[in-house]
Amino acid sequence: MPNFLELGIQEQWVKTLKENGITVPTPVQTETIPQLLAERDVIARARTGTGKTLAFLLPIMQKLDPARAFPQALIIAPTRELALQITEEARKLARGTEIRILAVYGGQDVDKQLRKLEGGRHLIIGTPGRLNDHLRRGTLELGGVKTLVLDEADQMLHMGFLDEVETLIQALPYKRQTMLFSATMPAEVKQLASYYTRDAVDVTIKVENSPVPLKHIRQLVVEVSDRNKQQALVSLIESNKPYLAIIFCRTKRRASTLNAALLELGYASDELHGDLSQAKREQVMKRFRDAKLQLLVATDVAARGLDVEGVTHVYNYDIPQEVDSYIHRIGRTGRAGEKGMAITFASPRDKGELQRIEQGIQFAIERSHYEKSGTIVENRGSSRTSSGGAGKNGSRKDKEGRGKEGRPSPGGRRGEGRVSNGSRRGEGRSGEARSSQGRSRGEGRAQTSSARTGGEGRGGSNRGTSGGRSQGRSDPQGPGRGGRGSSTGRRGGSGRKS
């Protein structure tokens, strides 16, 4: 693999990269930098965390002329956080040079931005809304821009910025270089690219057959009811002990409510969403980057494109409704070759979304489910407890030795299933089973015309042993609980009849 010098990056920038601990280019940088230095338009598709920002920043910085005090390059990003993140990287590169950079985004003092624009800036990095605001005011002159970058183009269109982006593009000179970077390439992005690029080089960086880094991110689905979701999250946080974790919620209200609950439980947590002022958002992100926060509860828009070192876990508290959102969410961990874990909570009504996600990423996600006892049990039959860490595959038995079978054993296995024998029918609920010295306890629902039989077990296996203890309720008319029972509700133990 060529180094940065061999790609065409000048010595001064290579030295700056080394000072920042960067010596080897990533695949997307290797593929795009020579094309960009050759003044070609580029459409690049690469997942998050692959070094896309430096791929377009290095050629831009190398071509800027500090002697010309007007905007020569424009980078458009969908969110303030991403705009600030790009600005931070650009300023690291520009340190010690005369290149002047300005971030333009909402929530910031407009007059302050105006003064900086009047002073002359070579590189403008901003969000569509605020850039258009300056364009309407006549305070932003784009006639000298020779390079345009659309970063996270798919998300920009998803957030409804198409009209604003096109307004900005139309204010630029026709003869310019256009770069379009995106993690995914839906039809709308392809159409935008075809309109505004000229003979663009198409670069696609593939990782295995999936758009997510499967080697670095372990993915897990935890089946849980909405009512028990918060309890399940807390159990997993206690089990996983993340260094830094991002918890994604679907709405601002959900994020705020969950953050309040986590703070009440004593966690170092804060929230990130669109209702916060820009100053507050910057404060929250600084605390998170400095590891003064352990948990960041965020919405998709607020956390889009965030690149924070040390994020070990991502929790999808609310399942994303689109495959692209799932890819971007879990891409916050497992970055730069580090290991990460992405856990998605799913209720029975989320089955459709799960299927779409698995089809989109071309990967069958590992399944488990949450029990009220605080245990996360693997659906394949192996389990782990919330008080212990997971093994390589998260598949070690818990303290009570729960496994996949529906019969008690010396290790105390448990399971859930259905049994049908004549008029009897037993259906395992989410099931609790404990075994100790031959004693078993099962909970289930059963219904017969004259008696109720409760049982748990897969493959039609009924619960209980002659030496075990069953508790149940028998009701010829409605649902009941029980181990094996008769119309009296008793067998090998105690029961209730109603």
Image: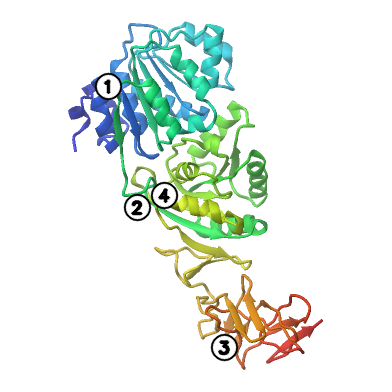
Residue 367 image point, x, y percent: 49, 62
Q: Amino acid at mark 3?
A: Gln
**Direction from residue 260 to residue 7 in the image, left or right:** left
Q: Amino acid at mark 4?
A: Ile
Furthest residue toward front = 422
Which element is circle 1 on?
loop
| Residue positioned 54% across, 49% down in the render | 316
Image vertical order of residue 86 relative to residue 226, above or below: above
Q: Is residue 207 visible?
A: yes
2 or 1: tag closer to the N-terminus: 1
**Mark 2 and mark 1: Cα distance apart in space:** 33 Å
Q: Quadrant of the C terminus?
A: bottom right
Where residue 215 is drawn, which disc sits there?
Answer: 2
Q: Quadrant of the N terminus?
A: top left
Which element is circle 4 on?
helix
Q: Amino acid at mark 1?
A: Arg
**Mark 3 and mark 1: Cα distance apart in space:** 74 Å
4 or 3: tag closer to the N-terminus: 4
Which of the 4 image quarters holds residue 437?
Answer: bottom right
2 or 3: tag closer to the N-terminus: 2
* Circle 4 residue: 361
4 or 2: tag closer to the N-terminus: 2
Q: Are marks 4 and 2 in contact (CB under 8 Å)?
A: no
Which of the 4 image quarters holds residue 143?
Answer: top left
Label 2 environment density (alpha carbons within 10 Å; few <14, some 14–19, many ≥20): few
* Circle 1 residue: 40
Q: Is residue 341 visible?
A: no
